[in-house]
Image (cartoon, rainbow, N blue to C red):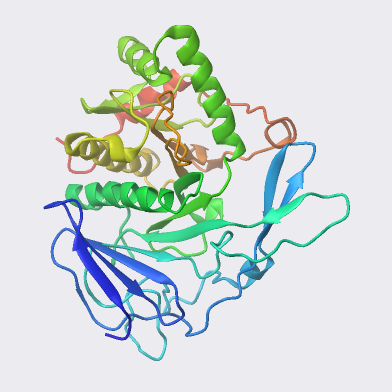
Amino acid sequence: MNASSAQNSLPPNRYERAEYVKPDGRKLWLYSRTHIDVGDIPSPSPEAVAATPHLRWHPLRGEWVIYAAYRQNRPFLPPPNYNPLAPTRDPENPTELPQGAYDVAVFENRFPSLVPEPGPAPTIDGTLTADGVGACEVVVYSQDPNTNVGELDASHVELLVDVWADRTTRLAERGLAYVLPFENRGVEVGVTLHHPHGQIYAYDFLPPVQVRTLQMARAHRESHGEAWLETFVRTERAASTRVVTDAGEALSVVPPFARYAFETWIVPARAATRLSDLSQQERRAFAALISDTVRRFDALFEQPMPYLMTIHQAPTDGTDYPEWPLHIEFYPYLRAKGKLKYLAGTEQGAGVFANDALPEAKAAELRAVKLPGAS
């Protein structure tokens, strides 16, 4: 093996994890439901990319903008015979992953938007700047390039939930303020590598969406005496019209305030703040609903649904946030067959979404989907 490794099993009897160092110095973590056994650890290049991101403050929006110009050189729709996220087959053309036995892989992004030690930010007259401190990781869901999260077997998706929880915990240990696992799927949302994968961004500041979420969740708890998630689950179960699937320990819902036609949220049945808070049974329910949601999306118009998926957990800055609502948001980009949802003037210019579909009607359509193999 051409790279150092450290191996253990966490938590016991759930999965095995192994850590390696790539030839260019980046870290790779492999996860498996059984024993991990791999060969040489590859990297597309033995030389590390000189990643020097920085932040600039937007004075009218009150938020940071990341600048990482070197990312223009990242892979963009590579030729069909070269898949950088598949296990290496030709040592002369190495990819990111080794051959061997494992289920899920996570590695530090070769072209990161944020890094642990970015170097000093430039000085710009009249503009506040800051170092681009953080972390960016790629999560490869499977060695199979032709599958997706809706087609993976149940225990594999449950492992993926465990991986997101584990990486969030480990990035939090590095003192980063917020960890966002997400998936971009489909060329319609700008995906340049089709192998099933997602990413994780970890910031050393609280992003604006999370700042606003925290403010509103805190206000709800103070005025109602309970977490917003408790109120939401009780209300949606009572109404039932927007619930797509109720798995007991978790449920999927087209929220009454959906901004996209088929926007779907996955929430635990009880108040929780992070994936690591969930029991094994609750993680199993989350995994089942993730698969169920993607399968319904794909069956809806009999084609793969382009979507963005984001996992919203409590900040990781060392403070407890009992008001935070753990949830997963899916933003499907087809509002009807062959019709994309574009962010136009009101969305981009004013931040006010316009939805031409009622959540109750779209939830009914998703419930009515006949899933392949279902009786």
Going by the picture, which residue comes out furthest to the bottom? Answer: 92
Where is residue 100, by image quadrant? bottom left
The x, y position of residue 250, in whole percent, is 27, 28
The x, y position of residue 260, in whole percent, is 52, 32
Asked if residue 149 can be seen in this view, the reply is no
The x, y position of residue 175, in whole percent, is 48, 50
The x, y position of residue 366, in whole percent, is 35, 30
Instruction: Report the residue at 50% width, 20% height from top.
Output: 218
Quarter containing the C terminus? top left
Instruction: Report the residue at 54% width, 72% height from top.
Output: 75
Instruction: Report the residue at 16% width, 58% height from top.
Output: 33
* 117 in relation to 4, above or below: above
Asked if residue 332 can be seen in this view, the reply is yes
* 221 in relation to 163, above or below: above
Judge from the rendering whether residue 278 lies leftward or rightward of residue 362; answer left or right.
left
Instruction: Report the residue at 40% width, 83% height from top.
Output: 94
Where is residue 105, by image quadrant? bottom left
Where is residue 17, by image quadrant? bottom left
Judge from the rendering whether residue 243 lies leftward or rightward of residue 344; answer left or right.
left
